[in-house]
Image (cartoon, rainbow, N blue to C red):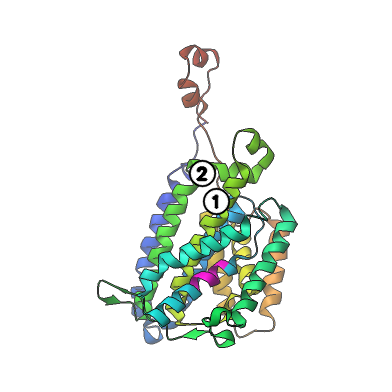
Amino acid sequence: MKAGIMEHPQFSLLVGIAFFAVMAVVPTCLELAGMGGGGIAQLDVLNKIGIYAVLALSLNIILGQTGLFHMGHAAFFAVGAYTTAVLNTMYQWPVFSTMPVAGFLAALFAFLIAMPIIHLRGDYLLVVTIGIVEIVRIALMNNIFGITGGPNGIYGIARPELFGLVFSSVKLQFYLIWTFTGITLFLFYLLEHSRIGRAFNYIKEDDLAAAGCGINVARYKLMAFVLGAFWAGMAGTLYAANIRTIEPMSFNFYESVMFFAIVILGGSGSNAGVILGAFLLVGLQDLFRGFDSARMLFFGAAMVAMMIFRPQGLLPPRRRRYNASRLIGKFSPAIGRRYPFGDE
């Protein structure tokens, strides 16, 4: 039976293009709608959603695609943000020049901590990663190496500048953040449909079977950690340049819980689901800001309801489909005649 249009391999890519085309005109629409200050408050929220979407997409590689229970992602985020802050404020590096360094140091940190724990599974790995994010926060609070500023953090981070264009306004920051989010989504789409992405998926479904098929499970798990951390570190650069002041409490355990919840709510392993989860959780968090004491109760109730009524998430990943007739066609024609497979 022919697959429907929503099952077509290129459907999600076309939806993504349409989504970002709509996002491109959002600032203009807010201005035309007469929002206060040209919609600065709304764009600020969208900027935060974009940064959290990038962070959740990077976590999705580890949690959603590889199936590793990791709740210490804020540690990699912190390494990237503090790398940018230190290099920019102390050594006057341009913000964009710090981005690859921030990603590299976050990836190196992930590699060093993941090496001894990569064999752990499930709850055991989860507990260890929770400890890691708390260790990083405490180290930053104690002004490690005398460069993190202690509890006060680091302030005075410069705005990003590219070819003489300074991203000083909220509108320009919006385009910067969402351009990076679009690039991230496209690259992770390619990763998902690559040989590496399929290996991640096999490990998530059954790591013993994956090992039996010749996949080096430990190496691919480590690769997922390093890749996710690298992207989280670069997202830290965007975050530091956006708010211009960072302090240790911006990278506490609550932030890791938010990233984790975004992936689970949207659909573990689904890039589109992660974007939707970021809009819902971060957007609703801002919407309920006036109910500070009750909003966490609301989020908790929403997560419990999700686990009961839709445990696969709002937009679960599309199941992989393979055309058996094309596969058989690669072998002897006699096999195809003997086993006539049709399109799914």
x 39%, y 61%: residue: 20
- Magenta residues span 76-81
Q: Position of residue 301 (x, y in %)?
A: 72, 69
Residue 196: assigned label? 2
Q: Position of residue 163 (x, y in %)?
A: 25, 71
User: What amino acid type is highlighted by mark number 1?
Assistant: Met
Label 2 element class? helix
Relative to the observer, which residue lies in front, 339 or 160? 160
Label 1 neighbourhood size at 10 Å, few (<14), some (14-19), many (20+)? Answer: many
Among numbered discs 1 and 2, the one appearing first in the sequence: 2
Label 1 element class? helix
- Residue 264's place in the image compared with 28, above or below, is above
- Residue 39's place in the image compared with 337, above or below, is below
For marks 1 and 2, give the CA distance: 9 Å
Q: Main secondary structure of the magenta part?
A: helix
Q: Position of residue 293 (x, y in %)?
A: 69, 84
Residue 18 on the magenta span? no
- Residue 190's place in the image compared with 275, above or below, is above
Outermost residue to the front:
145
Residue 223: assigned label? 1
